[in-house]
Amino acid sequence: MALQLNPPPASSSAASSCKFCDRVEKLFEHKLLTRGVLQRKECGPRFRLKVSSMQPPNAVSLETEGSAVQYLTSDGKSIGSQDLKSEITVMGSSKTDVTLSIIVVGASGELARSKIFPALFALFYEDHLTKDFTIFGYGRTVMSDDDLRSSISENLGCRVGNRGSCEDKMNQFLERCFYCTGQYSSEEHFLELDEKLKEKEVGMLSNRLYYLAVPPHLFVDAVRCSKRRASSNSGWTRVIVEKPFGQDLESSRKLTRDLNQYLKEDQIFRINHHLGEELFDNLLALRFSNLVFEALWSRNYVRNVQLIFSEDISTEGQGRGYEDYGVIRDVMQNHLIHLLALFAMETPVSLDAEDIRNEKVKVLRSISPPRLEDVVIGQHKGYREGNMLCRAFTDGPTVSEGSLTPTYAAATFFINNARWDGVPFMVIAGKGLHSKRAEIRVQFRHVPGNLYGRNAGADLWNATNELVLRVQPDEAIYLRINNKVPGLGKRLDRSNLNLLFGTRYPKEVPDAYERLLLDAIKGERRLFIRNDELEASWSIFTPLLKALKARKVQPELYPFGSEGPVGVHYLAAKYNILCSDFDEH
């Protein structure tokens, strides 16, 4: 559809014409038309908008004094505004006319109190939120505004070095926080929320961001009620949903279909906070802004790739929910496979979200489901040392006796394309291990015809060059090289060329939730998972999960605080992968 805007007649004042032009340009500044082309014709101040998507679907008139709005179909025929499903909205003459409302659904839960509200405060403290914003907590727990403020204030904190005005900032932030009690399936209660929001938004274009910090089975009810009773009538409405996104391919498809009854895909932001860590952007920058690495990024030079995510804590406190999902669904499918796709993708057309996600999907669709013989699963046993006791996973109060849910999994994947054919990607995830660790390790092939053999003191197996991108425990990028030991001999040693981020950039790094919330507010989607990415990743893991369940595969037990199951070393040896030392830094 095209929208033709006819300005005031030539007899009107220049000020009137300028005012009209300014208001048209606000259409794009406020992103009320998300995709379009604004053309000013040379024959006069006539604007023509070629529109492929209009947001939002409700309206305020664009007309200024003496102007007229004419709607045209694609063939140039004029139609009346009544014939449109909704009017076009244009508001305001300045950015202060826009207000942002952030609604945290499930505000009394641990996720909201420990992560979401502190992240929002950090954004406010750093002046990343719009001047006019309001935060509403919504939940079933009966609370007052003051109760909510007291609950979340315990977890608020300021950046190191910026704490002089922290208390004042905290008070200003808490004054913007309110609470509404209601059921997640009650349209009537969401209507009450809408009325409270409108009291804060009066006279301004309102954008609304919902964060669903509730279990997945409540997503659809909350989305239905918010859509019907508490969506913005003048700005955009976006919804952040937390993982897990289903338990397998079919349940994920059903969740997507149910959400799409009320939301368009570009309104849905599927969040996985691990994708908001620095590793994502570091990986892109390292590969695509350094010629030396892009040239090596293929089967010709890379021997294997390891993606490792380990935690030194147990699953206690996650209860029945963790037994239903396990480490394969919780970490591998939701996080590591998307990091693998980012690592292995071809160069995108640009850094725009859709271009990056298009390339990721191609990689995911090229990965075959792993065979059972290429998978090791484990479950941690109990551990006691002195007065410290950690129960076995199956001793948890909400875990079924004899549960086969893995707390550790390692699997080898292969990408069936020209760049990565034959290169094993070993993905490892586990809880109850002896270190907290998140990293990508790239091991390169041996030097052909290496002049330095074992007789010169170098172990060719251990002398492999290795690139490591680490998030935890100490964020770093380092390259392992072979160098000669000083002296009269020819003995080689291995050394690291290090970039330690904490040393090079001592400023405190924003939390992943801060980055993801800010991106959702801006409409930036590259750190969020698109529906076809989700489907492609579930297509990889669903056959494996079904095979494990059908054959009732017993997880290998490993002591809490250990390196994990012994079987992972046999899997690594099968593909000539050198398992890294968990103690190295």
Image (tube, helix red, strand yellow):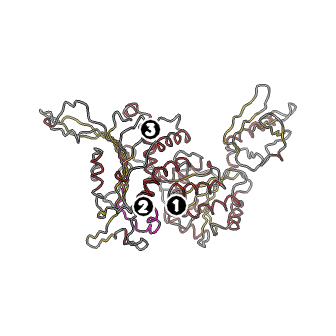
Q: Nearer the viewer, mark 1 or mark 2?
A: 2
- Left or right of 56? Residue 574 is left
Residue 320 located within the stretch drawn in magenta: yes
Give whichever of discs 1 and 2 has the lower sequence position. Answer: 1
In the rendered image, which quarter contains the N terminus? top right
Near mark 2 (Cα within 10 A), the count class, few <14, some 14-19 or many ≥20, is: few
Can you identify the residue that label 3 sits on?
Answer: 285
Secondary structure of the residue carrying tag 3 is helix
Cα gap from disc 3 to disc 2, whole angstroms? 43 Å
Measured from the top left, where is residue 563 in percent x and y?
29, 57
- Left or right of 433? Residue 184 is right
Secondary structure of the residue carrying tag 1 is helix
Residue 308 or 161: which is nearer the viewer?
A: 308
Near mark 1 (Cα within 10 A), the count class, few <14, some 14-19 or many ≥20, is: few
Cα gap from disc 1 to disc 2, whole angstroms? 57 Å
**Span colored in magenta:** 305-326
Secondary structure of the residue carrying tag 2 is helix
Q: Is residue 472 visible?
A: no
Measured from the top left, where is residue 94 in percent x and y?
70, 45
For badge 1, the amino acid type reads Glu
Residue that protrudes farthest toward the front in the picture: 551
For badge 2, the amino acid type reads Ala
Can you identify the residue that label 1 sits on?
Answer: 167
